[in-house]
Amino acid sequence: MDFRLTVDQRQLQTATRELLAGRFGRERLRAAVDAGGPLDRALWAQLHAAGLFALRAPGASGLGLGLAEAVLVFEEAGRALLPGPLVATELAAALGLVSAADGVAGLVRLPHGRGPLLVEQLPSLDLLLVLDSTAGELRLLEPRVAAAVARPVRGVDPLTPLWELTGPLPPGRPVIGTDTARLWAEGTLLTAALQLGLAARAVESAVGYARQREQFGRPIGAFQAVQHLCADMVGRLEPARVAVRAAAVLLDAGPRLDLAALDPAARAEVAGAKLLADEAAVRGARDCLQIHGGMGFTWEADVQLLLKRAWVWQGGFAGPHECAEELAAQL
Amino acid sequence: MDLSDSPAEAAFRRGLRDWLGKTLPELPPPPDPADWPGRRAYDTGWQRRLHDAGYAGVHWPVEAGGSGATPAEHLIYLEETERAGAPYVGANFVGLLHAGPTIAAEGSPEQRRRYLPPILRGEEIWCQGFSEPGAGSDLAALRTRAVRDGDSYVVSGSKIWTSHAEVADWCELLVRTDPEAPRHHGISWLVLPMDAPGVTVRPLRTLAGTTEFAELFLDEVRVPVGNRVGAENDGWRVTMVTLSFERGTAFAGEVVAGRRTLGRLARLARDNGAWTDGGLRRRIGTLAGEFTALWRLVQWNVSEAGAGGVPGAGASVFKLRFSQARQELYDLAAEVLGSGALLLSEPDGDGAEAWTAEAWTAEAWTAEAWTAEAWTMQRLQGLSYTIAAGTSQIQRDIVARRVLGLPRSGGN
């Protein structure tokens, strides 16, 4: 056993962090908030070119890597607060279903949970994956066909424009031989990885502010009440991080398109990882907001973007309710 | 990132499993928890078997008489012994996990020869005389005095939370040898013979009703100067050096136990109908996810330690989360049990005294299903987890300062 990252994995992590800091730094983040609107295809093409979606892709354009590497890269994507259907696009690219140059994919699962059925960036998609969990089938749909039964709605996260699917979806074209349970688990795990990065950014932001903001003649970070909020953020992040990485290693150990049922232990591990990562991100963003005081409540501060995205990703793929039930079922 | 056993680790695991399978059925029945001499005999007997099989001090360096296993093998040892329901380290705890490693690192060759082999063979028991009534989280505030008089120190003061003091042969004792020096620089580390004149042990009763530790009163106890480990006034550093023996494995066995207990709790909830309470069921599921993550955190910390890193901050994060999870486990069990969680005897049992004697044994602990009093006793005893070995507040201080680099406040 050696759970540490390999040299290659560390390099991938560092290179991705540096690349995303350059491509989607704070100025570009705020510009995207101000611009709103459709997906930035130029940025998306840059992400493709950087290999963000090619890690597990088949054929010559693929990098021949696994989920262990994908979760490292997606952690960095989460840290950068990259907008767009990142996870669905990665899953589609791994199945060889979208263009390796600039393809964009969305994903919905049927039947869906409470509330309306929402799709991110519907008109910008090249492909909509419909995961029918009742039939255990993956189907492909033209986004414009889905758009005919959808309407735009205002979403809470300024960087996640949403469409509501109001009518029944046409059946679409089935993809034979896809393990839908595994696909869902992979999407859940990659979303958890995004949450890790977001939670790490929340810690950095909170600690940075606590060092610099002075009240009562000293930095607020010198007060134990603030220190312990920050320590608990780390206390939630670190177990979540190792849980995500371990789940990735376990999923990699199984063959990707194996029709046999996904190992229940691996499924539970994914569920636990998502649950912990959601908690680290959502509560981390909340604590970060609290530490920022009145500034945290403003539109100008980035804290709002952290919290709102954490909420979006918490509902992305398996949410807390589903994960907790999955874990209970394994006991 | 590799979570699987290497060939050497797999061989170690196989060998240990075989040995446990053969040895555990030969063990005598576990003693009554109130029977301290019986507990000492049981724990040292187990240690002797480990020694004879080559598993004593599995984490100790070879030159100290240990087997020099890697941190990963040490983790396998803890995992397999827990899974098999083997006895705990028990009364051997301080010798094997603290005093022994300290002497191995800082003792003279003569001290190592004298003290280490009897620990490994299960012949001598150690206790720890660190905390004092006025020095808990702030250990460096300790006031027990040692005054040099010829070839001896004359030691007076009191210690508290001393586990296994009733049956210990030796005590690793922190004393103040220079009251004028800055507090961390006037402390020395002594080996106190527990049978020396002037040593009084008074058992402390815990809120669980058991006597797991004691107070130690020292009234002009003479300790030979040769019993000092390390230089005079260098005892703080000597104590901290032992932390470098920490390989991220503290509580590793307990995480394995916690996962098994969750399975037991789920069975209980399914049997008594509590499982149909979706909110409760999902909280149990969530806690299962947390225990699995804690196990992964142990593996992570052990991997870092194996590469030469000291998992200081990682250990604090782990301790913080593990102690919370451990308490949550028994709070959830209380919800599953309902009013049964208020009982220390079985509702249909024949006496309220049962738990103090035969009910609460190692056998009960490893059983497939627990009695209500077993759950309740664990809930009570678990209340110490967020206090002992560094309170949760101290762990947060450590994370805030050492991981996040936040400034020292007036209070810490």
Image (cartoon, coloured by chain):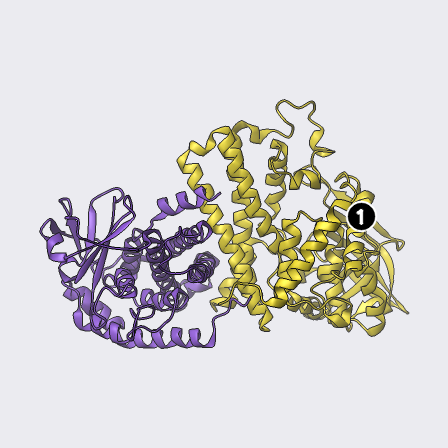
Is residue B71 among the parts visible in the rendering? no
**In the picture provided, is B412 more to the left or to the right than A296?**
right
Helix, strand or loop at disc 1? helix
The residue closer to the viewer here, B240 or A217, is B240
Q: Of the residues shown, which amino acid type is indicated by label 1?
A: Arg
From the image, tell me which residue sits under label 1: B40
Which of the image's four quarters has the N terminus of chain A?
bottom right
Q: Position of residue B287 (x, y in %)?
A: 48, 46
Q: In the picture shown, does residue B351 fall above or below B263?
A: above
Q: Position of residue A86 (x, y in %)?
A: 27, 63
Q: In the picture shown, does residue A282 fall above or below A21?
A: above
Q: Position of residue A170 (x, y in %)?
A: 14, 48
Chain at numbered mark 1: B
Determine the colour of chain B.
Answer: yellow
Q: In the picture shown, does residue B144 fall above or below B331?
A: below
Residue at the image position 76 percent from the left and 39 percent from the top: B34
Q: Residues within 10 Å of mark 1 (few under 14, many from 20)?
A: many
Is residue A275 among the parts visible in the rendering? yes
- What is the quadrant of residue A273 in the picture? bottom left
**In the picture provided, is A323 more to the left or to the right than B312?**
left
Q: Residue furthest left?
A: A148
Q: Position of residue B311 (x, y in %)?
A: 57, 66
**In the picture provided, is B324 more to the left or to the right than B374?**
left
The chain assigned the colour purple in the figure is A
The residue closer to the viewer here, B48 or B176, is B48
The residue closer to the viewer here, A111 or B195, is A111
Residue at the image position 61 percent from the left and 24 percent from the top: B347
- What is the quadrant of residue B275 in the picture? top left
Instruction: Tally the marks.
Output: 1
**In the picture provided, is A60 more to the left or to the right than B222?**
left
